Image (cartoon, coloured by chain):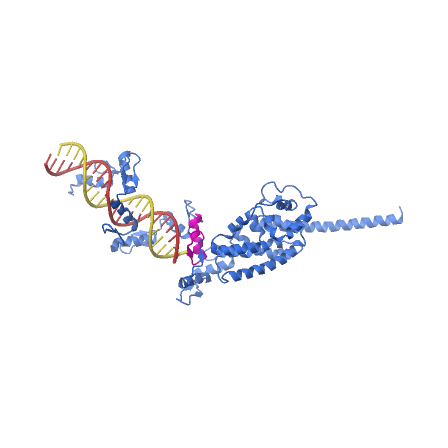
Chain colours: A blue, B red, C yellow
Amino acid sequence: MSSVESLREFVNERLTAAAEEIFRVFKTTIVQYEEEIDRQRVMLDICWKPQVKLHRIELPQQHVCKEEEVLADQQLCNQERNSSLDQEDPEPPEIKEEQEELCTSREGEQLVLKVETDTVMLTPAYEESDHSEAEPTSDHQLLSNNSHVAESPDQKGGEHGDSGSAGDGEQKEKKRHHGSKSHSDYAKNSSDIQHNTHPGEKSFSFDKFGKSFKCTSQLNAHMRVHTGEKPYSCNTCGKDFRKPSELTIHMRVHTGEKPYSCNTCGKTFSDSSGLRSHMRTHTGEKPYFCKTCGKTFRSWGDLEKHTRVHTGERPYSCKICGKAFTHDSHLTAHMRIHTGEKPYSCNTCGKTFSDSFGLKVHMRTHTGEKPYSCQTCGKAFNIKSNLTVHMRTHTDEKPFTCQICGRSFNQTSGLTRHMRTHTDEKPFTCKTCGKAFNQTSNLTVHMRVHTGEKP
DNA sequence: CTGGTGTAGGGAAAAGCCCGGG
DNA sequence: CCCCGGGCTTTTCCCTACACCA
């Protein structure tokens, strides 16, 4: 072996050792990043992994560009939002939070515009997003090949199974720089779409790990919308909240603090949105309207409640019987059926009621108030439904028909009672002689036999 | 024929429960 | 979150017509 060859061999060995060392360090770094990203993914427990790996492995430069775009777009979106929405109006909190997160890409801009429209036009942002999304394109499949998408538990089906060929890289690069395709390319379903529009997608960068943390915390705050996580608890009543600001406002329930007052009537409120909504009672303004029926409302909350009339959504369900309600207050009232609670009592006779209006109607039995009068005979009734039934005596309407004999009745109670003549049911028994009757009034008449009472 | 008794329906009072909206 | 007003349903009750029988 010549000295030249020996030198070459020596150099080769050193180079190999150096390369191995570099590779080892690189691999260690990769593993650390992998672990960190996996940790983030587990923490979030959603489908972030595909996007994270995609950018980290294949687009070390891409994130820089995208991050700048994100900032620019964020400003753009903020300007857009500020110019189009009531800046101080916190309503609707949910949607607004979504808006902030949607303002992250050029695609996001479009979504924001839609969402802002729907703040008035009723349709939830995500619903609209879903509608705007097409089926995954072939590009999506292409991208997925090299990006571990198939590993994601959220990516169902076998369409991402193959490992990508070397030639895919350039196409992918082009695709990802093509802003208008960003999230439809990456998305498979609506949940993917939502997450692909978050700023965190771009911020999980390979070479700016510190920044990733910052974005992740912001991402975490947002993701509580999806996870339902509410880490901020009230020390007084134990209620949980997603954000510190929500807890702050809630605490005023306990402190009684109402820092917002109406300049017109002096009424005070614990939060600014309450005051703003109240101010509309003075101005008559009803800026929120239902696009289904056209009804207008003063606040987003009112519109949101109303929307359930059309959607049939019943978000409040009883844990005991499972019955669901459109309002939380309806569930509260319903729970009194199970608890037997009757917080409303009559000052005159002491009778108690489970709901306030029940007491109010009851009071009419003491006052004699009968606000509903028959236009035909002038007879008055304390509640409208009793007048409605009464009107059948004039119209001869008998909507309740016996399926056995065909006889009809103007009240359900009449039919129910009549049915006992077919079933021979006699639930009312004389305690003196044991004779049974199918009507309680017949038993009452019968008792005269024993008491000697004359009618 | 009359009065006692039983049967069945008419109608109303009031409470229960639920719902939409302010 | 609370409250109000209202709708529909259900229960309970009083009253009455009618049949049957001694």
| Residue A440 percent across, percent down from the top left | 24, 41
Q: Quadrant of residue A79?
A: bottom right
Q: Is residue A300 left or right of residue A20?
A: left
Q: Residue at x 53, y 50 (%)?
A: A129
View extreme (right): residue: A2
The answer to whether residue A193 is seen in the rendering is: yes
Q: Is residue A373 magenta?
A: no
Residues shaded magenta: A291-314
A168 lies left or right of B3: right
Residue at horizontal 55%, vertical 52%? A223
Of residues A298 and A429, which is closer to you in this image? A298
> What is the x, y in percent for residue A121?
47, 54
Name the one closer to the observer, A396 or A431. Answer: A396
The residue sitting at 69% across, 50% down in the picture is A28
Give the mark count.
Answer: 0
Relative image position of residue A161 (x, y in whole percent) = 63, 41
Q: Position of residue A177 (x, y in %)?
A: 65, 53
Q: Is residue A224 above or below residue A445?
A: below
Q: Check the picture and name the quadrant holding the C terminus of chain A.
A: top left
Residue A32 in view here: no
Looking at this view, name the residue that lies furthest to the bottom. A263
Relative placement, left or right, of A325 versus A351 is: right
Is A296 colored magenta in this rendering? Answer: yes
In which quarter of the view is residue B3 placed? Answer: top left
